[in-house]
Amino acid sequence: MKNLETYQNFYFVGIGGIGMSALARYFNASGKKVLGYDKTNTKLTQNLMNEGIDIVFEDLIDERLTSLEKENTLVIYTPAIKTLGILDYFNQNSFEVLKRAKVLGLITENTNCIAVAGTHGKTTTSTLVAHLCKEADLPFSCFLGGISENFKSNFLYNGTTYSVVEADEYDRSFLNLSPDWAVITSTDADHLDIYGDKNTIEEGFKQFAALVPEDKQLFVRKGIEIGRPHITYAVNEKADYYSDNLRMDHDKIYFDFHTPTETIKDLVWEIPGIHNVENATVALAILSNLGVDFETLKKAIANFKGIKRRYTKHIYNTGKIYIDDYAHHPTEINAVVGSIRTFYPEKKLLVVFQPHLFSRTRDFADGFAESLSDTEELILLDIYPARELQENFKEITSDWLLKKVNLDKKEVSNLSDAFEKIKEKDFDILLTVGAGNIDTLYDPICEWLEKN
């Protein structure tokens, strides 16, 4: 295919996805004409349109498409979209059509790429690495899987020497990247619809690790077997880089950070959870290896605000607390609920959870049931299907999952009724959690709790 620079038009099929939108913003920032289609108009697509990107929400072949010339137009699509008339039009008319992962890989070929992979923790870690790069004023661009609370976007352009990339294991997308530096946070079983079993997903991560040219530039959480020499990191146990002496004071977490040659005491930030200190540990390790001084890193860690929908917390005058999180795997839910139980052990917790994918619900049903049993009350929403069809998973429903949850106060609800049900509940802490469209509850809940 041609060099990316030769294209003047970039059409995104599924532009509202978190990974797709970051790429769209990159080409828009580069002065290219960016267009796209998405099924649903969301806050994210509204923001893209406000930035000058042309988006349609109907699957129509109109003048916007027919006026595009195949010689100077690159079409980028997400595998989440299976059938679409617009995509058929581009294929039938011999346009260059590439997966998102392939295009991101082409961009990383020409940068010093820092790629963060893992079934959990990659969004927080990659966003933190990007934040540290920004605070250190390194020449970088980032492509993230979440919206940074610091720069209010999943993309930031500050140069092209470095790229910070969330390396997605779904569909083996991360094997398209050219990482010079890499992090592997976890290799738990997930995406079994793609990989089949845990051994296969672990093999996928080993293939990703093999892409990194230098052993000393591959950072892997201690305890993960990755098939080649690497640098280890950990929390509360010795590794090449590790953090310990964790303590909490007035909603801030303090910890000490150890390199192979020195100890930096009393780093502080506001992001709760031991797992997040683990993410901070590897981010600090990489940036220190890039030559950033610890005084800069210490200040940058302290003003990191986190990522939207990653333990986004609000405390109200009534004393009620609302937490919203993207967790959609039992391990992730355990981490969120575990943090709440650690910091607020006496408070009554109401969880509203939306399962994501029929296949994931089936594959991890017992794990979900155990995770969701650690609460006082549960509202379980209907399963968000994403790319899957209920007819292919007829037995897999939220009613089926609810029966496995060991809890007295539990019920199934559809999304449209959930807000009214929440308002009737007695709770100290409300946790909404899931990766589908449960985020549409966020604004109404915030407004209600602010007024009541």
Image (tube, rainbow, N blue to C red):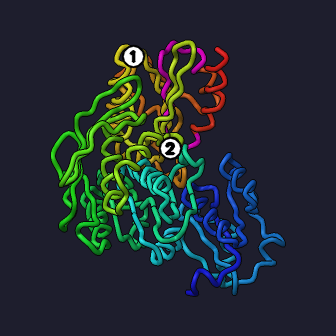
Left or right of 176 on screen, residue 159 = right
Q: Magenta span has 432?
A: yes
The residue lying at 64 percent from left, 74 percent from top is 75
Quarter residue 362 falls in: top left
Q: CA distance from mark 1 to mark 2?
A: 33 Å
* Residue marked by disc 2: 307
**Any part of residue 169 in sight:** yes
Image location (x, y in percent) of residue 81: 58, 62
Please say if 423 is above or below 116.
Answer: above
Image location (x, y in percent) of residue 277: 32, 41
- Residue with the most extreme left position: 238
The residue lying at 49 percent from left, 59 percent from top is 137
Q: Earlier in the sequence, mark 1 or mark 2?
A: 2
Dot 2, how many residues are within 10 Å of its Cα: few (below 14), some (14-19), or many (20+)?
Answer: many
- For the residue labelled by badge 1, is the local secondary structure a helix, a strand or a loop? loop
289 or 178: nearer the viewer: 289
Left or right of 95 on screen, residue 121 = left
Please say if 31 is above or below 196.
Answer: below
The residue lying at 46 percent from left, 26 percent from top is 351
Name the kind of residue labelled 2 in the image: Ile
* Residue marked by disc 1: 408
Quarter of the image with the N terminus is: bottom right
**Any part of residue 374 in sight:** no
Left or right of 214 on screen, residue 312 = right
Residue segment shown in magenta: 422-437
